[in-house]
Amino acid sequence: MPTVLTTRVWFPDPRSAQSGGEFDGLVAIGGDLSVPRLLLAYRSGIFPWTDNPVTWWSPDPRAIFELDRFHVPESLARVIRNGVFEITIDRAFRKVVEACAEPAPGRERTWISPNFVDAYTRLHKKGHAHSVECWQGAQLVGGIYGVSIGGFFAGESMFHRVSNASKAALYHLIQQLRSHRIVLFDIQLTTPITQQLGAIKIPREEYLRRLAEAVEMDCRI
């Protein structure tokens, strides 16, 4: 059974997560989305996924991008070469999160509730969450956001309103992470798109070892 959290800010060992079935990877239920709890969760290899109640997860295996093995398809390479999008960092963080929460084809609902939008905006104001935006003129057409602690970055969600915009945002995010010496880029679970771009899965135990080293590094985006 998952641990039930109350007001005290703590988490059980992520290795206690449920294994198999619908709730594979579920560690705990309850608590809140305060900045201290979110930071402790990510440091512990745990992330929130639903609201009311909040559920906390640590899947095994864990999906990551190795920063030196990102695959750039020719169509994306053309977009980057031609400068199709203006790219910015942290110009419109909340708008990116809100856009990720919008329904999209094949995705009528998302886990990004208004409480999540507010919580990650608070993390952003504390310097622990960042976004990459893709623009065409004044229109925000794609983006990605995530959580940063030391040499660790957790990609949370991305969106696009025109073709290749989210992939371009991801490409430019990876360039930023490399330039700031980030060593672990967690994406939690794979999707067909991230697999196409080179995402891999590693055992939870390896992930936790690399995470413990990464969060102690003196890096900042």
Image: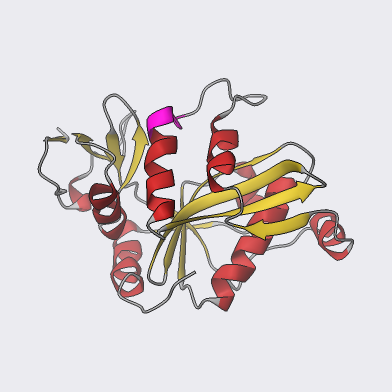
Residue 182 screen position, x and y as percent: 48, 73
Instruction: Count up the numbered dots.
Output: 0
Residue 84 screen position, x and y as percent: 85, 54
Taking the spot 55% from the left edge, 48% from the top edge, the residue there is: 93
Taking the spot 58% from the left edge, 28% from the top edge, the residue there is: 102
Residue 197 visible within the image: no
Taking the spot 89% from the left edge, 61% from the top edge, the residue there is: 82
Residue nearest the viewer, comparing 18 with 41: 41
Taking the spot 34% from the left edge, 50% from the top edge, the residue there is: 60
Residue 86 screen position, x and y as percent: 78, 56
Q: Is residue 149 magenta?
A: no
**In the rendered image, the vertical position of residue 110 relative to residue 189, given as above or below:** above
* Colour pattern: secondary structure
**In the rendered image, the vertical position of residue 8 relative to residue 53, given as above or below:** below
Residue 108 visible within the image: yes
Residue nearest the viewer, comparing 128 with 11: 128
Residue nearest the viewer, comparing 106 with 166: 166
Quarter of the figure with residue 154: bottom left
Quarter of the figure with residue 114: top left
Range drawn in magenta? 111-115
Q: Relative to residue 134, is residue 148 drawn left or right?
A: left
Q: Relative to residue 194, is residue 125 drawn left or right?
A: left
Q: Relative to residue 70, is residue 51 drawn left or right?
A: left
Residue 142 screen position, x and y as percent: 69, 44
**In the rendered image, the vertical position of residue 191 relative to residue 4, given as above or below:** below
Residue nearest the viewer, comparing 127 with 23: 127
Q: Principal SS element in the magenta part?
A: loop
- The N terminus appears in which quarter of the rendering? top left
Q: Residue furthest top?
A: 108
Q: Is residue 113 magenta?
A: yes
Q: Relative to residue 116, is residue 6 drawn left or right?
A: left
